[in-house]
Amino acid sequence: MRRTPAALLSLAAAVAVTALAAAAAGSDATTGSGATATAAVPTAGVRAGAGADSVGVNGAVEWNQALLAIVSAPPAPGATPSTIHPTRNFAMLAAAVDDAVDAIDHTHTPYLRQPAAPAGASAPAAAAVAGHDVLVTLYPAQRVALDSRLADDLAALPPGRSTQDGVAVGHTAAAAILAARAGDGANAVPPPYLTTGAPGDFRPTPPGFAAPVFTGWGRVRPFVLRAGDQFRPPPPPALTSPGYARALNEVQRLGSKTSTTRTAAQTEDALFWAAPIQNYWNAIAEQAATVRHTGLDGSARLFAQLDLSLADATIALYDAKYTYRLWRPVTAVREAGADGNPATTADLTWTPLATTPADPSYPGAHSDLSAAAATVLARFYGNRDQFTVASPTVPGAVHSFSRFSDAVTGAGLSRIYAGVHTRTDHTAGRRLGADVADYLLSHSLQPAGPAPRY
């Protein structure tokens, strides 16, 4: 991985520095070769590429971009409740757009079976309406801006029966995904969390001692997995084990706010990846699709695979977090005198570089969601790829990678340097995310007939 100067940023990347801005505190997740792609929010109106209707924008990219802008802005009145994890909304959007497009193009099995579309129906119209309808329902306070975006999209299409039929397909696909997720448990009141106070058991962390978040998210019905515990990782190492001591001692050295062993590059990594991790990977996918001129059908399938994987990886993450309830490094270091491990040393004043998220430590969300996303992108485009990632939390910083898997490593290890996770969390999260994505790729959205043009 190498870092490039801000002068190399494209206009789209510069826009992303603002559009992707989001607070890191609260939750971890809130938690082939080709041309270089910049992880940024692309400008609106990216033209559809090969394999898509030749008229109009690539709605899969554009409406994903619209959602990124929404979740990256300060919460508006009437916004989606903070107890609803954003990955669910990304998945609903992507599934609706993909189902609408596939009802016309028939490149793969849809997420939800749709009625047959009339011959000649416009796929761009269907994608735009599906995206609009889902986002307006999820973010009613954004209706004016979303209505305007849809009007612009439809105005760019030729008037007539084709567009009208596409509009109808989009309405149907959006209604189907909204109905399918209406009773998934996302709106349930999160159960309260009570710590036992025993060594190893998670408890709220300084400085704010915020109440734990997403305590019931592991019980939300997955999109593709059979259940949130389907790939639950094994328990973390016992507090008295050598493995536990190694992991804790590493974060104690590298993750301290006053660390003298953390390098300048590691400090930058800790700050660089501090925003909600799903935003980075959606932006990476947007640019990958745009640079490669991936058509509307291929882009729609890519985002469906990506965001369904991220949503289920998040459900699986919280199932594991609140099953094992492992304390965070800041607690573990300060309470090391009570862990029964002679290889750990308590430091009552130890403070991490970053604010600790308000949920248990194991497994790590950045590692989990990054592995899920990279697995999808590597399956789609090949793992070897030159791309760059812009950070909203370190304006002007751009990191370059040659493999999607390298970005997984960078994002995951950054949480050790930030002092909020251990290597044990990283390893378990990485395995969990890969397992979730592998399952989705083999059980959903399968190619139908000739391979689609990507």
Image: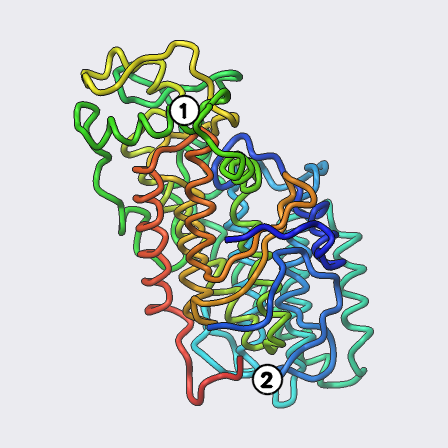
Q: Is residue 4 above or below residue 215?
A: below
**Type of amino acid under label 1:** Pro
Q: Which residue is mark 2?
A: 51
Image coordinates of residue 87 in percent, x first then y, are 51, 49
Mark 1 and mark 2 lie on one chain; the one further toward the N terminus is 2
Where does the image place residue 156, in percent across and percent down from the top left?
80, 75
- Give the residue displayed 72% in from the left and 36% down from the top: 77
Q: Are marks 1 and 2 in contact (CB under 8 Å)?
A: no
Q: Amino acid at mark 2?
A: Gly
* Residue 434 horizontal/vertical position (percent): 34, 56
Is there any visible trace of residue 211 in the rendered image? no
Find residue 348 and report its image quarter.
Answer: top left
Please give the label number shown on residue 192: 1
In the depicted structure, whether residue 247 falls above or below residue 126 = above
Compared across the picture, whether 77 is left or right of 386 comes to: right
Position of residue 293 in the picture relative to residue 406 (left or right): right
- Crowding near pointer 2: few (<14 within 10 Å), some, many (20+)? some
Which of the two residues, 106 or 393, is positioned nearer the viewer here?
393
